[in-house]
Image (cartoon, grey):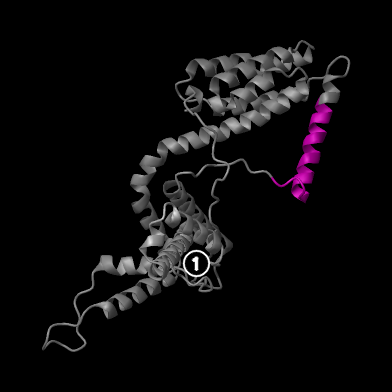
Amino acid sequence: MPNHREEQADEPTDVPRLEELESPPGSPPQNSSMSHLMELQNCVSNLSLAHEIVVNQDFRFKSSSPPKDSLEGRVAEMVHRAFWDVLREQLESSPPDHRQAVPLLREVKTMLLSLLLPAHVGLRAQLDRVLDLELIQQQVDHGALDLQRLASFIASTMAGLCAPVRDPEIRALRLLTDPVDLFREVLRVLELMKKDMVNFTLLSLRPHLAQQAVPYERAKFQELLRREPGSLDHTTSWLQRAAQEQRAALPPGPPGSDPGGRGALSPSAVLNRAYMGLLHWDPQDQRYPETVLMDRDRLDTLGHRVDLLALQAAVLLLTSAQCGGAVLSLPGFVGKLKQTTAALLEGSQAR
């Protein structure tokens, strides 16, 4: 775990985002309240998050911040700059004014406590003793606050709690002498450490979540059906269509039997045919099954790879038929032909 310094690598830079689920196809009744719609949205959001955690092994929580060139980003930057400018002005006054430092230390203490585990009894007591807010307030009132000593203690505590990937940032933090820059960096690194703790907890719980994934998702879909009976209509149509196709593909019955009679349908065969249909789903068809909507991006990517593989195989067969085995037996010819074909066909299909 991060505080035991077991995390060895930074999180991947390309973390897949959760797919935004479309609203259930069943239109809510006109008298549906806003709270009812919000409950449905929460149900779908929780289901989507739990599914992504279990299915996507690379899933990580990332710090979210608005783009700097957006209105929200510019406003946030202005507010933060104003806060730190006020703090700098107060600390550089004579005598120094530490009133703004008290809520800042309170926030730092809260964030440090959130990183502790139940076994960290001694460290928790040390934090309460050193960052005693009542004592700090008394020191501020009497002009006796040693901010540098508290900053050094905070940096040392962070060094013991952080993951190894944060060591360079902790070392850089300890080199700062300006108190404003120091506490700005402390808050930034603490946010990263909180994210590391969440992701480590997620990694630890994933095997247990995987065991409960099927009953949990079944219960959530049953809840959706109870709230909105038409919320899985597309899934029903998808399976019915696959069953009809599978029945049509069955061989006719023995002589003397019902002319239209065929063998019994296998649920596994119907499900396999249904999923194969998802690999070639028409992008313009909005009736995508609700139960697999969370995996649509993954299935579309897999379908594209299947199509690409089929085209590569067709090119190899045509080359073999036209040029004979002598050409295909040339060293590296098949591999180069596959690479060239893949490069030409990549991006040619809009899914």
The residue under label 1 is which amino acid type? Pro
Question: Residue furthest toward the front?
Answer: 326
In the image, taking residue 193 as reference, residue 264 lies left or right, namely left
Q: Secondary structure at mark 1?
A: loop
Work out whether residue 294 can be spotted. Answer: no
Q: Is residue 49 magenta?
A: no
Is 167 placed left or right of 269 in the picture?
Answer: right
The picture places residue 205, in percent across and down from the top left corner, at 41, 38
- For the point 50% across and 27% down, the residue is 2
Q: Main secondary structure of the magenta part?
A: helix
Residue 156 in picture, x, y percent from top left: 61, 16
Q: In the shown orientation, is residue 176 left or right of residue 314?
A: right
Q: Name the foreground residue: 161 vs 87.
A: 161
* Residue 75 sits inside the magenta stretch: yes
Classed neighbour count for the residue bearing mark 1: other residues with Cα under 10 Å, few (<14), some (14–19), many (≥20): many
Residue 192: image x %, image y %?
60, 33
* 44 shown above or below 255: above
Q: Position of residue 202 (x, y in %)?
A: 46, 38
Nearer to me, 133 or 19? 19
Tell me the residue that label 1 is attached to.
Answer: 24
Q: What residue appears at the point 67 percent right and 43 percent down from the top-left corner?
A: 65
Q: Which residue is nearer to you in this view: 249 or 146?
A: 249
Image position of 311 with respect to 199: above or below: below
Q: Is residue 139 above or below residue 52?
A: above
Snapshot quadrant of residue 146: top right
Residue 211, quarter of the rendered image: top left
Report the magenta residues as a range: 66-87
Count of residue discs: 1
- In the image, residue 51 above or below residue 21: above
Query: Looking at the rendering, which quadrant does residue 160 occupy?
Result: top right
Residue at the location (69% across, 12% down)?
A: 149
